[in-house]
Each structure stands twice: as structure tokens, then as C-alpha cells.
């Protein structure tokens, strides 16, 4: 690898510096959701965040979406302070959130309509992305005609349609059965490798995080802090069978121990 390639590889895409988020309860008390979070995500990296329920994982992602302001600290995206939602972010939530009265293609093109872009310029891209996720021929179906996994694939395509540089994903496979969840993890790995997007992925699943990630950030119970960042040195592309290997188990055990502490 050349010096130039190393420099490009280390370009920060997301930077959080001593970020805190404090909510006010109905009783007027302070609820510290995340505390002193400092984290850097490199351009093109796949980074997962894991931790116990209620540790502030989703709060962290909502801050990165620009839907919440940090109480203190700095949030930088592509080197600029985050001041509200950005067009170069794609977001995938726990539920697909597809409009049932719209066909798949229209659901995919919704961000284009919302951003008042020329729909005709994105239709071919939408068809290519649907083909990429294995949904060619389903563009005229309604969400109710699709399985849960297929609906979530549509939501991923919708998040990619405007070609964002960063994809934020909030436990997107949590509602799926175990087998479909594994298949979707393999599919997401393939999409990430083919598109080169930067992905920040929130999950409860340690095995899912190890399988998908370059690094895994482990959060403490509330107030959520970054306890440790684990680098995952496993070859890519990773087949699902890698989950049965000793090296995979070592990473999973290491992360579990950090959480249990």
C-alpha cells in the first residue's frame, strides 16, 4: 500500500468529540443518555456499535442523523459541524417504514420526491439498486406482497437512491427471524463492498457486529460511553460459515466480556 493510499484510508468521515446528550424528564431531572462519546469513523469503513438495552445506541445514531442536537461536544460529518439533517446521509430504521399504498419503485423514489429532484434521472438507478439487492421484477409490487426481509431490502435501496456517502442503520434486522437475519447480513456485506459506502451500524447482536464490521464500538450501560473499540481482523468477503470458526468466537467472546463488565 502506498503512502497516498494510507492517507486516504485514514480520512475521517464521522468524528464525535466528547459528545453528551442530556434529556429533561417530566419531573425536571436530567437524564444523561450518552456521556463523553469520542469516536472516529473512517471513509469507507463498516463500524458497528453494540451495547446493552438503553445504553444510548439509538440516541447516538439520532444525533448523527441531525435530528437531535448534542447537549455538548462536537459532531463532524465530512469535516463539517453537523447542523441538522444532511442530504449525503442515508438512514435505515428498525422497521422498513414503507408506505403500503405505494408500489416498491415509488417507495424507493420517495427521497427523490421529498428533495424535489428530477425523478426521471433516478429511475434507472432505482432499477439497478433493486437488481443489486435481488428484487428485480418486484418494482411494481406493494409492500404487503413482500416478506419482511424483502421489505427491509427495499428500505436499504431507498436509503441508497440519492447516492449518500454515509449509511446510518439502526438495528435494521432486529424484527427478522434468525435465518433471514443472517441472509440479510451477508447481503449487506455484499452491498457495502460493491458500493464503498461508509456504514455505521447499530445492533444488539454481537455475532452480527463481528460478521459485518471492520471495528466494533462497545458501549456501557447508561450513561452510554464507548468502553472499547475492537478491531475485527477477519478476511473478506466473509461467508456465513465463518461464524463457526475459533477466531470468530474469540472476537465475540472479547466483546461479550466488555459488555458484561
Image: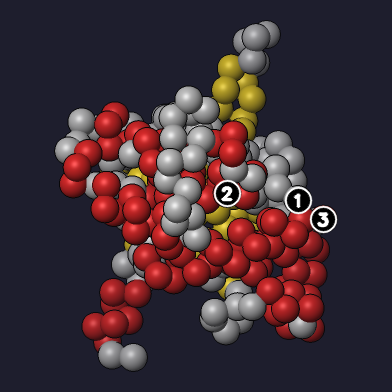
Tag nearer the camera, 3 or 1: 1
Location of residue 246 in the rendering, given as x and y in whole percent from the top left corner: 79, 83
Which residue is rendered at x = 74% and y = 46% of the image? Answer: 52
Q: Which mark is residue 116?
A: none
Q: In this view, does 128 lie to the left or right of 155?
A: left
- Please report whichever mark, 2 or 1, sits nearer to the chain's N-terminal start: 2
Whether tag 2 and tag 1 are in contact, CB under 8 A, the answer is no
Say if 249 sits above or below 142 in the image. below
Location of residue 123 in the rendering, given as x and y in whole percent from the top left corner: 27, 47
Work out how far the residue at label 3 is from the one at label 2, CA to CA, in angstroms: 34 Å
Pointer 2 residue: 150
- Please report whichever mark, 3 or 1, sits nearer to the chain's N-terminal start: 1
Say if 46 sits above or below 241 in the image. above
Pointer 1 residue: 177
Give the structural element (helix, strand or loop) at label 1: loop
Pointer 3 residue: 260
Amino acid at each position: 500500500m502506498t503512502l497516498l493510499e494510507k492517507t486516504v484510508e485514514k480520512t475521517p468521515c464521522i468524528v464525535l468529540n466528547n459528545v453528551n446528550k442530556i434529556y429533561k424528564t417530566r419531573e425536571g431531572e436530567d437524564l444523561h443518555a450518552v456521556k463523553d462519546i469520542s469516536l472516529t469513523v473512517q471513509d469507507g469503513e463498516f463500524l458497528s456499535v453494540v451495547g446493552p438495552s438503553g445504553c444510548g445506541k439509538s440516541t447516538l445514531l439520532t444525533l448523527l442523523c441531525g435530528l437531535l442536537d448534542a447537549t455538548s461536544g462536537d459532531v463532524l460529518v465530512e469535516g463539517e459541524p453537523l447542523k441538522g439533517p444532511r442530504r449525503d446521509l442515508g438512514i435505515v430504521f428498525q422497521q422498513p417504514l414503507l408506505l403500503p399504498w405505494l408500489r416498491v419503485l415509488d417507495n424507493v423514489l420517495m427521497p427523490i420526491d421529498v428533495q424535489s429532484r428530477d425523478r426521471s434521472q433516478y429511475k434507472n438507478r432505482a432499477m439497478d439498486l433493486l437488481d443489486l439487492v435481488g428484487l428485480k421484477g418486484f418494482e411494481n409490487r406493494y409492500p404487503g406482497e413482500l416478506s419482511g426481509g424483502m421489505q427491509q431490502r427495499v428500505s436499504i435501496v431507498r436509503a441508497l437512491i440519492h447516492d449518500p456517502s454515509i449509511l446510518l442503520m439502526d438495528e435494521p434486522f432486529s424484527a427478522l427471524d434468525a435465518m433471514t437475519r443472517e441472509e440479510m447480513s451477508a447481503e449487506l456485506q455484499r452491498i457495502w463492498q460493491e458500493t464503498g459506502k461508509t456504514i455505521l451500524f447499530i445492533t444488539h447482536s454481537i455475532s452480527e457486529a463481528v460478521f459485518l464490521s471492520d471495528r466494533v464500538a462497545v458501549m456501557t450501560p447508561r450513561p452510554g460511553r464507548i468502553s472499547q473499540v475492537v478491531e475485527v481482523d477477519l478476511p473478506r468477503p466473509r461467508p456465513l460459515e465463518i461464524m463457526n470458526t475459533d477466531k470468530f468466537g474469540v472476537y465475540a467472546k472479547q466483546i461479550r466480556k466488555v459488555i458484561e463488565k
